[in-house]
Image (spheres, rainbow, N blue to C red):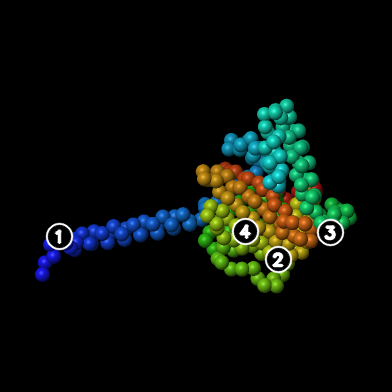
Amino acid sequence: MSHRGITRPKNNSMIKLLVILTLGILLSFRFALGQDSPPNIGGVWSTTVTAIDHPNWSVEELFACNCTSETYEYLDELLMPENDHLSALEIEEAISTYNRAAIRELYTQEQIDYLAVFDHADDPSIQCELFGVFRTILHNDPILIEQSQDQIIIRPEDLAADRIIYMDGRGHPENGPLSAIGHSIGWYEGNTLVIETANISANIAEDALNIHNADNARTIERYTLSEDGTRLHGQFTLIDPIMFSEPLVLERTRVFTPEVELLDAPCESISGEM
């Protein structure tokens, strides 16, 4: 029996429809994979300390430091037109003073008491010992990032320590030994590399800022690549309830400098200047 007014799709039409749907699914899957691909952050990245003449810096970045977010907000105020009478040196000094005060507000009494008796002559780097992890992270000299699927190696200059970040999904070893450089694992969140470091022993966290960390402090680093691939914005969090009343968060941007080669001066010449 035939039913007039009702047409059945021909086989060719059905096949074409299936092909179109399949291609759409494949393209969507391919696009999703592209979106999830890790950012290419391999290469040498420098701060304003060693690459002040680089043309890619913005005015704000020229005054950058290992600073809190509140310090950068204060910098924005200092760079407003009504403060054009301030010299670059005056702005730098104001930023430094503000940043140190913002960090000191987070000191616990333990940190205050420790700093009261700490002798800078006891700095282990004077004896050519490599920096601890947080001091390495905040080191102003260039860093070389070697990026692979299972791990990332970050190589700095001078007394800062080489670091291995495991990217293979492992966790931190349970009851692992403490060390100055700790144990680092990482993963990607979109265009950001996230690094978590644990099993850290007590050390100088940053000498210029006069901060120290206790045993079992943790750090979280976030490195976000700019859309044009020329900048790597770093956010560094030190979690140490013994020395700080809340996590200390500092930020700094590095610029891509493929023309730069890392230089390692003899330890004795560096430590002799400290």
Q: For marks 2 and 1, give the one nearer the viewer.
A: 1
- Label 2 is placed on what type of residue? Asn
- Residue at 71% over, 47% down: 68
| Residue 191, disc | none
Relative depth, front residue between 194 and 165:
194
Q: For marks 3 and 1, give the one nearer the viewer.
A: 1
Would you call the spot at circle 3 few (<14 residues within 10 Å), some (14-19), or many (20 or more)?
some
Drawn side of residue 147 relative to residue 78, left or right: left
Q: Which secondary structure, mark 4?
A: strand
Would you call the spot at circle 2 few (<14 residues within 10 Å), some (14-19), or many (20 or more)?
many
Residue occupied by mark 4:
195
Label located before the other in sequence (4 or 3)? 3
Residue occupied by mark 2:
199
Label 3 to label 2, Cα distance in Å? Answer: 20 Å
Q: Which secondary structure, mark 2?
A: strand
- Label 1 is placed on what type of residue? Gly
- Residue at 75% over, 44% down: 99
Label located before the other in sequence (3 or 1)? 1
- Residue at 78% over, 41% down: 97
* Total count of labels: 4
Label located before the other in sequence (2 or 1)? 1
Label 4 to label 3, Cα distance in Å? Answer: 27 Å
Q: For marks 4 and 1, give the one nearer the viewer.
A: 1
Residue occupied by mark 1:
5
Label located before the other in sequence (4 or 1)? 1
Residue 44 at x, y percent in the picture: 59, 48
| Residue 110, disc | 3
Label 4 to label 1, Cα distance in Å? Answer: 66 Å
Would you call the spot at circle 4 few (<14 residues within 10 Å), some (14-19), or many (20 or more)?
many
In this view of the protein, can residue 177 be seen by the observer? yes
Label 4 to label 2, Cα distance in Å? Answer: 14 Å
